[in-house]
Amino acid sequence: MSTLETKYNALTNDFKKELQNIITLADNAVCIINVTSIKIALQDAIDAQKIVFASDVELNVKSQKLNFPNSGSFNPDNKGNFWRTIHAANILQNWEAVLELSKKYCEKHTHLLESAFE
């Protein structure tokens, strides 16, 4: 694993820990930090490099919008749909705190990328 990957993993772990102080997250939730957005999804139990279909919500810090895909159906037995709804509702209930935290970590991600190319 490269130094950049190690730092990125530490960044996402730190974000997840701080986010858990604000909202409820699924045990297998993963956070994917980008320059202008953060995606929260469920990690696939079989392939850790994949996320569960229809489990993701994405907070765009630039547009200040919460996006989540529509799978076309909802079934409470489907953990992806269930946790996507829980995560979205928790984010909306704690909008200001989650948005500020997300902005902070998107900025950290930007600085991480910039330092990698210096």
Image (cartoon, rainbow, N blue to C red):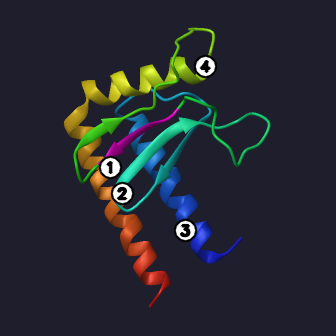
User: What residue would you read off at disc 4?
Assistant: 79
Q: Residues within 10 Å of mark 1 (few under 14, many from 20)?
A: many
Q: Secondary structure at mark 2?
A: helix
Q: Which residue corresponds to mark 2? A: 105
Q: Is the C-beta separation of discs 3 and 1 under 8 Å?
A: no
**Which circle marks residue 7 in the picture?**
3
Q: Which mark's residue is nearer the viewer, 3 or 1?
A: 1
**Between marks 2 and 4 in the image, the one whose residue lies nearer the viewer:** 4
Q: What is the crowding at mark 4: few (fewer than 14 residues within 10 Å), some, or many (at least 20)?
A: some
Q: Is residue 92 left or right of residue 71?
A: left
Q: Earlier in the sequence, mark 4 or mark 3?
A: 3
Which one is nearer the viewer's eye here, 106 or 3? 106
Which is in the foreground here, disc 4 or disc 3?
4
In the image, what residue type sits under mark 4? Lys
> How far from the left and from the top, in percent, is residue 88?
37, 27
Residue found at x 52% / y 23%: 71
Q: Is 68 in front, or is 109?
A: 68
Q: Is residue 2 above or below residue 8?
A: below
Instruction: Please name the amino acid that badge 2 sits on.
Output: Tyr
Residue 18 shown in magenta: no
Which residue is labeled 1 in the image?
102
